[in-house]
Image: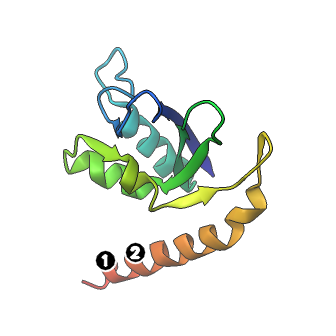
Amino acid sequence: MGIECKSISVEKGASALYFKQHFIVDKKGKHQVERISEFLRQTGRRGFLAVELRMGGGQSKQTYLIPWDIVKKRYQAKEVKISVEQIKTHIELKRRSKTYNCASLLEPLRKTRMDSLKNQSTETTR
């Protein structure tokens, strides 16, 4: 599994994660989404984008996992951003105090994997 982590401050007015602002382009002009997508393809790993939403003083941070294939499709479709509302529709990574409870991910990840396999199967039979 590969996980890329990003963090945005909702408290300070961030309403989205932007492909130009929050991801880097290397010296050769290759965007981070392209490089990570290639790495995942070459290694056969499943990828996720973990987005931490910092909510401000006294409020717990919220973190969501977006399957990388969704990030890649949005980037390839020339979408500019992933809004906070869209981020919140994905798998929430639960926190316990200051740590994350990864056990809460098992069922959502299983479901995501099954959905991904169904989509691949549908695409190859077309």
Secondary structure under the numbered disc 1 in the rendered image: helix
Q: What x and y, as percent, mark residue 124?
A: 33, 79
Q: Is residue 12 above or below residue 74?
A: above
Question: In the shown orientation, is residue 94 left or right of residue 19?
Answer: right
Q: Which residue is mark 2?
A: 120
Characterize the local packing of mark 2: few (<14), some (14-19) or many (20 or more) Cα atoms within 10 angstroms.
Answer: few
| Residue located 55% across and 40% down the image | 52
65 versus 17 height, above or below: below
x and y, in percent, of residue 22 in the image: 39, 29
**Which residue is rendered at x = 38% and y = 76% of the image?**
119
45 on left or right of 25: right
Density class for disc 1 (Cα within 10 Å; few <14, some 14-19, many ≥20) is few
- The extreme top residue here reads 27
Query: For the residue labelled by badge 2, is the local secondary structure a helix, a strand or a loop?
Result: helix
In this view, 28 is above or below 74: above
Q: Quadrant of the C terminus?
A: bottom left
Indicate the position of residue 6 as horizontal and vertical percent values.
Answer: 51, 35
- Given contact means CB atoms under 8 Å apart, are the residues at marks 2 and 1 in contact? yes
Q: Which residue is mark 1?
A: 123
Q: Nearer the viewer, residue 20 or 17?
A: 17
Report the amino acid beneath label 2.
Gln
